[in-house]
Image: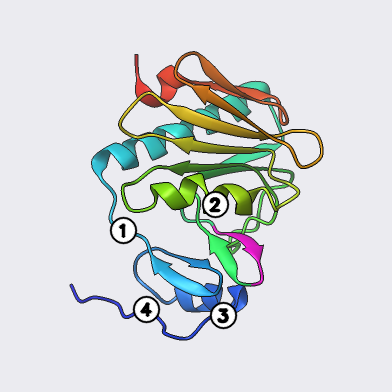
Amino acid sequence: MSAVALPQQRMSAQEFLAWSQTQAGRYELAGGEVFAQAAERAAHAKVKFRIAMALHNAIRSKGLPCHALPDGMAVRIDADTVFEPDAQVYCGPELPPDTIIVESPIIVVEVLSPSTGKNDALGKLAAYFRLPSVAHYLIVSPDARLIFHHARGEGATILTRVVREGAVAFDPPGLEIALADIYGE
């Protein structure tokens, strides 16, 4: 397998989306600069899958007009920043099959990895909440029973809850997921 050279020039979100569709692997754009996503450990992939399934099942059980997606779908933050969260939820009609950007996610999830943990906790936290639709941002540990749940409060306030037991409630849209569904008993 050969290494892919990252573009040296800065890109807009539109240029990045066109470029990334022709590339193998996963990439994100931050401030116009392209970043390759590192290979994932099994613990990361397992937790990511379980979160997407827990969100999907919670939506179905409540009969909400929302949709859970695993990684692979992009979220455009601004003209030169595009992230690919590990899972996300949007509400409303089903997206057309050729869609690559979720315009109005309500819940975004990032599972921590050794190479991106600081950016997930700081840079992405501030960026995701720049989107008016984002009501919840989860930062999830793949190695310990630990979730940081950031929720939009009044005005510019972001409320943070550290969750180690029980469930995470999302209001809106009106669902919850149990930590047991993510980490097992």
What residue does disc 4 label? 6
What residue does disc 1 label? 38
Q: Is residue 85 above or below residue 1?
A: above
Whole-percent x and y of residue 99? 61, 62
Element type where label 4 sits in the image: loop
- Precedes in sequence: disc 1 or disc 3: 3
Magenta stretch? 74-79
Element type where label 3 sits in the image: helix
Residue 124: mark in rendering: 2
Q: Is residue 32 above or below residue 105?
A: below
User: Do labels 4 and 2 touch, CB within 8 Å?
Assistant: no
Q: Amino acid at mark 4?
A: Leu
Q: Amino acid at mark 2?
A: Lys
Whole-percent x and y of residue 133? 73, 46
Query: Residue 75 colored magenta?
Result: yes
Give the left or right position of residue 154, taking residue 55 as reference.
right
